[in-house]
Amino acid sequence: MTDNESSEQNLRISFEFFPPRTDEGKKKLINIRNEYAKFSPEFYSMTYGAGGTTRTNTKDLVVEYNNAGFSTAPHLSFGGDNNDVIAGLIEEYKAANVDRIVALRGDMPSGLGSSKMVYANELVAFVRERFGDHFHIEVAAYPEIHPESKSYTTDINYLKGKFDAGADSALTQYFFNPDAYFYFMQRCQDAGIDKPIYPGIMPILNIKSLTRFSDACGAEIPRWLRKALEAYGDDQESMRAFAADAVTEFCELLLDNGAPGLHFYTMNQLQPVKTIIDNLGLNK
Ligand code: FAD
């Protein structure tokens, strides 16, 4: 075994799902989850609809997956809920042996935007205060800076605030520009952040929806990549093959330059992420 192979085996991999709405979708996701288990992920995570709109669905799936032996972290934010509701929810997670939480401020669905948002650092402090060290706490990080951020420096300082409040590691928003991550990591280090920050990796499935989503969340699709993807027109199969290669090279660059692992946004699909993992040789 080469050094490279042995260090690849220490990489932390995790997979993110969102809660399906239908029983059919839930059944499909179980099969997908089981396939992903072959890559020995450290954990799966399950998103929480903006403002807590999937509260029960997220909770039920997280509890079910953990009971079945698949370590799954709920994403969690206060949304419009009060301390008692959130404490009760976390209590249920603890009782179900959930040991990891992704703590977020979250966004409010349009129409409910008037509630005061609880920043993620406050949720981290809340979990630590009430539940001690029971949970490994992940938080969100933004190599291209959160869209509402006043400046690069304030965003890094708020990220530091989340670690100071007790977060253990961070998962990033997806991005396609490796320099953004390298610069960000340097700035984090300069700010005294010494906790691992795992790049979030988005497979490219559909250029139109990716562009729309990226505009909203502040992730940049480099011009060369967008143009190259658009050139495939209706030939989605060739576009996806090209995209998988491009994202694979991107992951290689991140890993070769010190990224401690990868967090995959699966979009509840198997093949796009599996292709990238296979290409990377992380399928052992
Ligand atoms: P925060 O860290 O609280 O930051 C929000 C903004 O406020 C930033 O601009 C920051 O600079 C600023 N800020 C932070 N702390 C303070 C403070 N104390 N005082 C003043 N300003 C502050 N959304 C969902 O709805 N459901 C999900 O399941 C979900 N999962 C995600 C998973 C990952 C890995 C990532 C990267 C994002 C996810 N999101 C999810 C999106 C996320 O909820 C939004 O990006 C949201 O706008 C910010 O959440 P946050 O936890 O990063 O907020």
Image: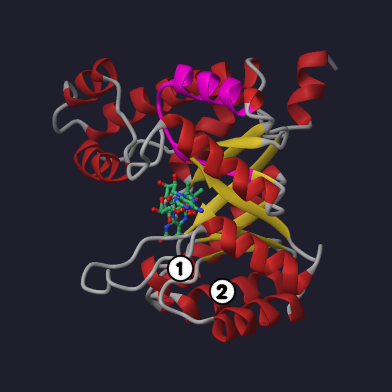
Q: Is mark 2 within 8 Å of ligand 1?
A: no
Quick one: SS at disc 2? helix
- State the image coordinates of residue 140 (x, y, percent, origin top left): 53, 47
Instruction: Give the residue type at disc 2.
Output: Leu
For mark 1, what is the residue? 19
Crowd tier of the residue under label 1, counting other residues whose Cα lies within 10 Å: few below 14, some 14–19, many 20 or above: many
Task: Work out whether residue 166 or residue 72 is closer to the camera in this orientation and state it.
Answer: 166
Instruction: Please report the bounds of the magenta region as a residue range.
Output: 170-188
Q: Is residue 77 left or right of residue 63?
A: left
- State the image coordinates of residue 197 (x, y, percent, origin top left): 63, 36
Quick one: SS at disc 1? loop
For mark 2, what is the residue? 61
Instruction: Give the residue type at disc 1.
Output: Pro
- State the image coordinates of residue 127 (x, y, percent, origin top left): 68, 68
Residue 13 at least partly seen: yes
Instruction: Evaluate if marks 2 and 1 touch, with contact meaning CB atoms under 8 Å apart.
Output: yes
Residue 74 at least partly seen: no
